[in-house]
Image: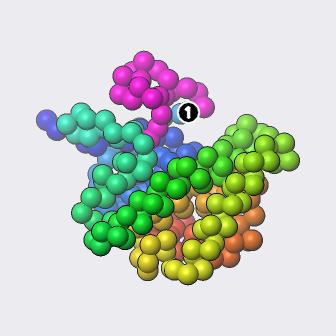
Amino acid sequence: MSMALRIYGDSISGNCLKVKWTADRLGIAYDWIETNVLTAETRTSAFMALNPAGQVPLAVFPDGRPLAQSNAIIFHLAEGSDLIPGNAFDRAKMLEWMFWEQYSHEPYIAVARFQVLYLGKPVESLEPRLIERGADALARLETQLQRSTFLVGDKLTLADVALVAYTRVAHEGGFDLSLYPAVEAWVGRVEADLGIR
């Protein structure tokens, strides 16, 4: 008897939610297994046996194969769908944004949010580099979104799914999205397309 796709995720995590949103957008059936990072549920021996990195999100496919890392999971789920451009260069641009998200956006926007919202730190006590680099990331998005409706052309791709996850809640880390009107408008478009607002 075949099991359903299982997605282990923590609902406070943008990285986890992007997997949920992608599966929902594509009509992929799955069992969501809430896995609380704050209570170390990702560090249990049972979870570590599935993902030795001890991180969510984690997808376990019906044949038992696990796949970690949010952007790898959504790329696999979306294979052959309209969320991945058919044009090779556009597909590469989508991947460029997804790699940038994990290296130059998430480490600042998401970390600032986590420290403020879940650790209770005042924004003023955060490491200045977090705020500076987070603001740089939002400015980079603003520049692009002044030129295009979505990050890669005029339709939603995985680049938008990946980057909206923490951008839409950046204010929870002390970032003022009203300073980035093109980003704010884009967040609204992506949320509408994904049905998440």
Q: Residue at x 41, y 59 (%)?
A: 95
Residue found at the very far top of the displayed protein: 45
Q: Is 180 on the left or on the right of 9, as rendered? A: right
Q: Position of residue 104 (x, y in %)?
A: 59, 53
Q: Position of residue 182 (x, y in %)?
A: 63, 77
Q: Residue at x 13, y 35 (%)?
A: 1
Amino acid at the residue labelled 1: Val
| Camera-side residue of 21 and 106 | 106
Q: Is 32 on the left or on the right of 12, as rendered? A: left
In the picture, which quadrant includes the C terminus?
bottom right
Q: Quadrant of residue 31?
A: top left
| Residue 108 lies within the magenta run | no
Q: Quadrant of residue 23?
A: bottom left
Q: Say whether residue 3 is visible.
A: no
Q: Is 132 on the left or on the right of 8, as rendered? A: right
Q: Position of residue 30 (x, y in %)?
A: 32, 47
Q: Which residues are magenta?
A: 37-57
Residue beneath disc 1: 37
Q: Residue at x 43, y 80 (%)?
A: 154
Residue found at the very far left of the displayed protein: 1
Element assignment for label 1: loop
